[in-house]
Image (cartoon, helix red, strand yellow):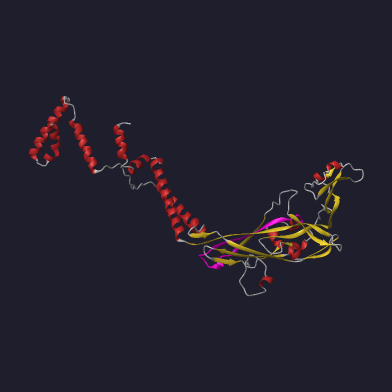
Amino acid sequence: MGQAAWKGFVLSLFDYKTAKFVVAKSKKVGLLYRVLQLTILLYLLIWVFLIKKSYQDIDTSLQSAVVTKVKGVAYTNTTMLGERLWDVADFVIPSQGENVFFVVTNLIVTPNQRQGICAEREGIPDGECSEDTDCHAGESVVAGHGLKTGRCLRVGNSTRGTCEIFAWCPVETKSMPMDPLLKDAEGFTIFIKNFIRFPKFNFSKANVLETGDKHFLKTCHFSSTNLYCPIFRLGSIVRWAGADFQDIALKGGVIGIHIEWDCDLDKAASHCNPHYYFNRLDNKHTQSISSGYNFRFARYYRDPHGVEFRDLMKAYGIRFDVIVNGKAGKFNIIPTVINIGSGLALMGAGAFFCDLVLIYLIRKSEFYRDKKFEKVRGQKEEDNVEVEANEMEQELPEDKPLERVHQDEQALELAQSGRKQNSNCQVLFEPARSTLLV
């Protein structure tokens, strides 16, 4: 890179660029600019401030507590259990209300199990055998019910059988009733009490109406017009979740109860209301052998001789998960200023886009570009340019063409005659005369 180029580069570092306002009489660009301004303004007013409420300080650190109670009774009369009345202590697990609870709707009962020797249930691959060597003594049956004793038990002349095991005998039956045992569970009621607090704003509220009427919760039921009576009918919750009660009661399932708190604390506390929605959390459309929801539990007893025995129960039912979410917002000057600043920046971006269209995309872009960008020199720089121009004229070769010499002489004569006529012209032609004399 030459010396002149380096000099130009160094001098360009000290250039200063400033905006030049050009009024372009272009209807297309003007219309585009106003449309962009209107769009940005509507975006700020409608979306940012009215819908998203971005002028507020937001608290999403919701603190929540849930208390649940289930009430109801059911009557059954089966060959295995006989007549029986079921109440809350029988079909609600756990007994104390939490944000996750289970309501039994169906049972497979294996009564009077005692520890002893019996055959493993058919259909368990690791428990099948054809001879005693297939049953290694002391090994547990994978996905089975006990420990192998080393014997293979076959029925009649069958070549295949099952291993003898040490377990709770008889082993669990595999049969399932065609109808749910507790059909009456559809009419049970669920009381869901929810306390919430937003610590940033020190705001607390509950989803139960504050009243001195002791009979309020005993007579009311939840509805869209009665949000502060959180007593739900179990069948209604299942229906709102898009499930069929008889289907989910047979094999079980998981229902989500969602409580949403969206509070605008710029308004009165009475406008901060809970919103409920329900859905089925397990995939009801999956045809799988493990579909539904169930678990096992046992009730233990002792006979008059002190020998322990138990009733094994495989419980099918509906698990309810109470999920609480929420946020609260209140006016704050900081997010308001930030969003207004962002809007102004978008306005500037719109103007920049219109500039690009004006000087690069339309037909007269070159004309507008010349009007927009202009190089201006300082007064000293202009004087230096004139001096350099004079020096270049002084450095003309001595063997100038004859025609140029005659032109210079004529100019000198004109200057002398003009000086006699008007003294003011002397100043005008003095540089020319001095040039010629040199």
| Residue 382, position as x, y percentages in the image | 23, 40
Q: Residue 242: image x %, image y %?
A: 69, 56
Q: Position of residue 24 (x, y in %)?
A: 36, 46
- Between 78 and 267, the residue placed more toward the observer is 78
Question: Is residue 383 shown above or below 334?
Answer: above
- Residue at horizontal 17%, vertical 31%? 394
Tell me which corner region of the image, top left, top right, bottom left or bottom right, holds residue 340: bottom left
The correct choice, above or below, for 334 with respect to 436 in the image is below
Residue, x 72% and y 58% (percent of image)? Answer: 318
Give left or right: position of 223 versus 78. Answer: left
Q: Is residue 335 visible?
A: yes
Residue that protrudes farthest toward the left in the picture: 420
Whether residue 45 appears in magenta in the rendering, the answer is no
Q: Is residue 302 left or right of residue 438?
A: right
Instruction: Identify the residue at the far right of this view.
Output: 156
In the image, the segment drawn in magenta is 250-274
Quadrant position of the C terminus in the picture: top left
Q: Is residue 254 magenta?
A: yes
- Please identify the quarter of the rendering in which residue 372 is found: top left
Position of residue 371 in the picture relative to residue 406 (left or right): right
Going by the image, does 180 lie left or right of 431? right
- x, y percent for residue 79: 86, 60
| The N terminus sits in image quarter | top left
